[in-house]
């Protein structure tokens, strides 16, 4: 049974304010807008399920990148969100378990001679990544000889890849699945330069809220809710993260 104190710490306004990140193409993390403008995706389904379990109304907050949603949770404007975990974010928010594990790589545009991740780490190579994300931070760390440009959204990154305004575009493997059809001739490089979990996060210092959110996510993994959310979004081959600890 959910204690009133834990519920108050998790959702102080009486609503579950959940953060969603949108993109031009769906992934196990990114949501999309459908033809009517409605936002749909794995994280939407998971946050709706958590709100229903808590018997709270769900208030969706939509962001263009995971850096924005991190700052919203850190500032207390957003109660709960999922985001890729790294050390920079751990300084801002408190993390619980992951529902999915991602591996990040590069997309190279049509005509590129780059064949491997190692070849990206060269002087003159222009990497493009999403602002304030685990992936762009890891790209800077693992490709110090290249230059890195940060952009605010996957939509802008996609436009730049189409126009060849960059040499290597950094995202997770699953994110590129939906983007490749929009970029004829582009290739996704094998392997990865980063692996991390997409984990539940709450504002710092809310231990009861974190325990409640973590327990609900683990319940969602055990009950098949996460599996169904991935399947509904078309990611039938995506594996649910193993149970925490």
Image (cartoon, rainbow, N blue to C red):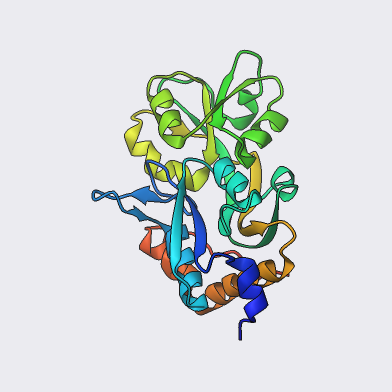
Can you name the residue that lies furthest to the left here?
Answer: 36
* Residue 97: image location, x then y, percent: 65, 64
Residue at left offset 36%, top offset 56% = 40
Q: Work out whether residue 109 can be spotted.
A: yes
**Residue 149 position by quadrant:** top right
Residue at left offset 38%, top offset 37% = 180
Residue in front for this viewpoint, 86 or 212: 212
* Residue 69: image location, x then y, percent: 56, 47
**Residue 207 position by quadrant:** bottom right
Residue at left offset 54%, top offset 23% = 114
| Above-or-below relation of 37 to 209 | above
Residue in front for this viewpoint, 84 or 66: 66
Where the C terminus falls, by quadrant?
bottom right
Can you name the residue that lies furthest to the top here?
Answer: 124
| Above-or-below relation of 154 to 21 | above
Residue in front for this viewpoint, 179 or 110: 179
**Residue 122 position by quadrant:** top right
Where the N terminus falls, by quadrant?
bottom right
Residue at left offset 56%, top offset 42% = 68
Q: Work out whether residue 242 can be spotted.
A: no
Residue in front for this viewpoint, 225 or 49: 49
């Amino acid at each position: 049974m959910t204690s009133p104190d834990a519920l108050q710490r998790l959702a102080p306004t009486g609503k579950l304010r959940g953060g969603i990140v949108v993109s031009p193409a769906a992934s196990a993390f990114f949501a999309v807008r459908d033809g009517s403008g409605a936002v749909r995706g794995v994280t939407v389904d998971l946050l709706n399920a958590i709100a229903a379990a808590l018997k709270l109304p769900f208030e969706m907050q939509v962001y263009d990148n995971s850096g924005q949603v991190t700052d919203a949770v850190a500032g207390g404007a957003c109660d709960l969100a999922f985001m890729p975990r790294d050390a920079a974010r751990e300084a801002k928010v408190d993390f619980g378990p992951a529902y999915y594990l991602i591996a990040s790589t590069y997309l190279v545009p049509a005509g590129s001679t780059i064949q491997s991740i190692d070849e990206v780490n060269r002087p003159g190579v222009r990497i493009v990544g999403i602002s304030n994300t685990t992936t762009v931070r890891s790209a800077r760390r693992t490709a110090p000889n290249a230059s890195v440009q940060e952009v605010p959204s996957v939509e802008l990154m996609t436009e730049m890849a189409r126009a060849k305004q960059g040499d290597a575009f950094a995202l997770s493997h699953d994110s590129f699945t939906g983007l490749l059809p929009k970029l004829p001739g582009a290739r996704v490089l094998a392997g990865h330069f980063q692996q991390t979990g997409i984990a539940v996060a709450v504002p710092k210092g809310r231990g009861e809220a974190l325990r409640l959110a973590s327990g609900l996510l683990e319940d969602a993994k055990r009950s098949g809710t996460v599996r169904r959310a991935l399947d509904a979004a078309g990611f039938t081959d995506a594996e649910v993260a193993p149970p925490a600890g």
